[in-house]
Image (tube, rainbow, N blue to C red):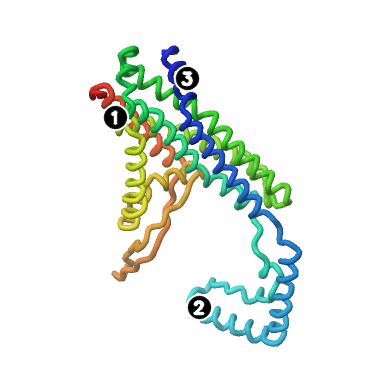
Amino acid sequence: MTRLLHAELTRLRSRVLLWLAAAGVVAIALVGVVGAWTMSTPPSPAEVEQAQAHLAVQLDDWEKNGEQQEQDCRDAQAADPDPEADYGCDDMAPRLEWFLRPVATFAGEGVGMIESMAVVLLAGALAIGASFVGAEFATGSIGNWLTFAPRRGRVFASKLLATLLGVLPLLLVTVGVLVGGTYGAYALHDQLGAVTDDTWPDLLASSARMVALGLGGGVIGVALGFLLRHTAAVLGALVGWFVAVEVVLRQVWAGLAPWTLAANVDAWVRGGSEYWLPNVCTTDASGMVSCESATRELSMSRGGVYLAVVAAVLALVALLVFRRRDVS
């Protein structure tokens, strides 16, 4: 098994396409860092001057009509059937920040951006695994390889393990670039925001989950490569799944939400998430039916179990098919 694994790692490193895919994943991470730099850049002096000019106009109007606007606001709040409604009538005076573009912070938008890049790790690892295996079938080299290593279970395991070992450094580097680059961008602009004692442990945990997600993507990619035997077929199947299930069917059938890949990836990476259910109807004691939208929680553990089961089932099916189906 060790010799098989060494041979597979050598084959993995020799494929130029896989190096290009890895470079693409890192490049997307760098684009995210550039976005963090842009979002955290404070307003320029020209932007501040323009905002002050707009503020002066609004303050002049407020001096003339402010009292009436406040009274109209209070009247509208009083007419609202919700007794807890708050229209913010005591905080209507124009302020400079209203006319300046918002500046993001690391503790807010920065951490969210890092976590949103998890799908890039998943897609990159999946594409590498599918391409690594799919090329073996497309070129016919898998048949020749089986004459040297006829035990298909060992061949399957060695390719799967080689893929995981191959993508792990890429995942670690990409997450490191994202976290370090994003933090640096916000720190240089002094826009870290409300960083607390929990921020870094939480970010470290979500980063570890992103790496685990990428490894799961590698397993899925290898499994689909063995099942469909061509990289283009794998990519086509994934696009078809995303359009048909994650987009179209998700809109038609709201109850599908907790079973979609996107929802469970989000829950796993972010430590839990919510999904929206329209038209949830209830009946009161008088028999009156009322319908309104509602949100439901999706836990991190639920998302992790879902993704692990998907990867494990696909790997098992791929192994069974590979052991029984002709490779020619």
Horizontal relation, residue 297 to residue 169: left or right: left
What residue is shown with label 3? 10
> Which badge, 2 or 1, is on the more N-terminal residue?
2
Residue at image location 48% in from the left, 30% down from the top: 16
What residue is shown with label 2? 80
Q: Name the amino acid type tagged 1.
A: Val
Disc 1/disc 3 C-alpha distance (Å): 26 Å
Mark 3 surroundings within 10 Å by alpha-carbon count, few (fewer than 14), some (14 through 19), many (20 or more): few
When the figure is inspected, residue 215 is found, relative to residue 271, above or below; the finding is: above
Q: Secondary structure at mark 2?
A: loop
Q: Position of residue 326 (x, y in %)?
A: 23, 23
Residue at image location 64% in from the left, 82% down from the top: 70
Q: Secondary structure at mark 3?
A: helix
Q: Secondary structure at mark 1?
A: helix
Q: Name the amino acid type tagged 3.
A: Thr
Residue at image location 46% in from the left, 16% down from the top: 6
Mark 1 surroundings within 10 Å by alpha-carbon count, few (fewer than 14), some (14 through 19), many (20 or more): some
Q: Nearer the viewer, residue 79 or 1?
A: 1
> Which badge, 2 or 3, is on the more N-terminal residue?
3
Q: How many marks?
A: 3
> Which badge, 1 or 3, is on the more N-terminal residue?
3
Horizontal relation, residue 286 to residue 184: left or right: left
Q: Nearer the viewer, residue 180 or 193?
A: 180
